Image (cartoon, rainbow, N blue to C red):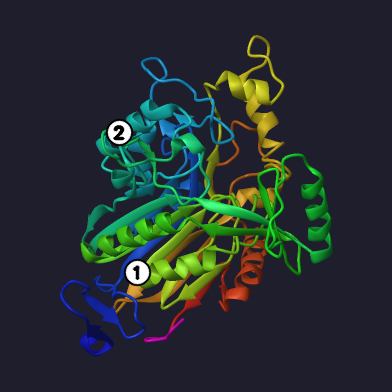
Amino acid sequence: MNQEKNVRHADDRDGPYDVDGSIATNVADGFTLVAVGDLIVTRPLTRRRDPDFAALVRILHDADVTFGNMETNIFDIRSFKGSPQAEYGGAYHVSLPELGPDLREMGFNIVGRANNHSLDWGVEGMRETSQALDRSGIVHAGVGENLAQAGASRFLETARGRVALVSTAATFTPLSRAADAAGEAPGRPGLNSLRLARSIVVPSAMLEGLKRVRDALPGFRHDDDDSGPVVLAGTTYKAGDTAGYSYQPEPTDVTGILRNVRQGKQLADFCIITNHGHEPGNWSQEPPDYEQAFAHRLIEAGADAYVGHGPHQLRGIEIYKGRPIFYSLGNFIMDDLRTPIGADMFAAQGKDPRRDTDAEVTAAEMGGGYESDPGFSDPVFYESVVTVSRFEQNRLAELRLIPIDLGHGKRLANRGVPRVASAPRARVILERLQILSQPFGTEIAIENEVGVIRLRPNSPR
């Protein structure tokens, strides 16, 4: 097939476009992307004599690009000059220096860094992690010395094409947000953020009750037009049919992310955008209401794959304009043997560092979780998939979903290391993913305990 027939050209500034309006992919046939979820890992794992883990490593090595979300910091506490921050992502994630080479040994060659743990150990932890990944030859994006650096694409050279990565986070600690210089004020190190304005949706009758509460509070000044949302104690409420949460992305953040994706694609053959968000909560199997439209805009701006992660469990898969959208890939590794742990986390779990151990604090947090979430005691947080996307003629031809089991029932020291799921467990995982993907019109076949999505040439989906 003459690929030129499927591409229309705009001016030189904009570059080639597919017939569906998205910026064209430009990789050699057989290009494969392996994408997984969160890498919560504290120690090297490839030294283990574990044939089940080794089988997964072979899959990671077979791809042109192997991506994961780097949700930890790498440094040696014996020489570390920083400290655990008062604001942290729910737990202090730290890994041994040997992790960098070990991730490379596993097959990872590109990782996202923007998430709620990016600055658990401050700017010092962020910088030392960057140095460790650089030494290991792993491309990483999402943090930097200012917003321009944190938001910029980073590039991986492969035999089948140049790959760009843009990494952003919708869930982050406020002080971890990077900023650019303004006049004499210097830029601020941190992560590439996507700020979200949250509203709580309630039935109309309930909204009227909230108005009465607001009006009764001292200091409230009544507006003649009272038909809009209600702001009460800093929280915005609006009327809707079903109670829930609604999110509005910050327009300036969206503009910057779209620009960076567009530029990344202009300078590469394939572009990955990754977004880390826990919204509306780790309890939810559905993405927040803003995310589908946001992901679609990013695909139209040039992204060839949208990889979501954050809630630590699987969410649905969509194929949009021939590109995969993963709303959450859950956890790939959850080997969470945290040590050391900051004093704030001991206090948050009601523990005493003079009496209790780091492992006891970790165990308490893993069973508690965020706000009203069920914590990580539910097996669903230990079940996920490895995704293998294969491209032919610059289109997604096949997407394979390999179910993995992270050993929910094992003791803490052995839990969280992935293996290919047993046949019964694999079917449970894939059937759940089928249901989660139905609202997006995605059909997943199950063949020999592997999920398969096949696309016809020139198919819009």
Under circle 1, the secondary element is helix
Picture quadrant where residue 183 is located: top left
Residues 101 and 215: in front is: 215
Residue 240 in the magenta stretch? The answer is no
- Is residue 220 rendered to the left or right of residue 161? right
At 37% from the left and 30% from the top, the residue drawn is 98
The vertical placement of 85 against 107, above or below, is: above
- Is residue 50 rendered to the left or right of residue 163? right
Task: Point out which mark residue 7 bears.
Answer: none
At 52% from the left and 72% from the top, the residue drawn is 318
Q: Which residue is mark 1?
A: 301
- Is residue 159 rendered to the left or right of residue 102? left
Q: Position of residue 387 (x, y in %)?
A: 47, 62
Q: Which residue is mark 2?
A: 185
At label 1, the amino acid type is Ala
The vertical placement of 71 against 87, above or below, is: below
Q: Position of residue 32 (x, y in %)?
A: 34, 65
Which residues fall within the magenta stretch?
456-461
At label 2, the amino acid type is Ala
At 32% from the left and 36% from the top, the residue drawn is 130
The vertical placement of 55 against 290, above or below, is: above
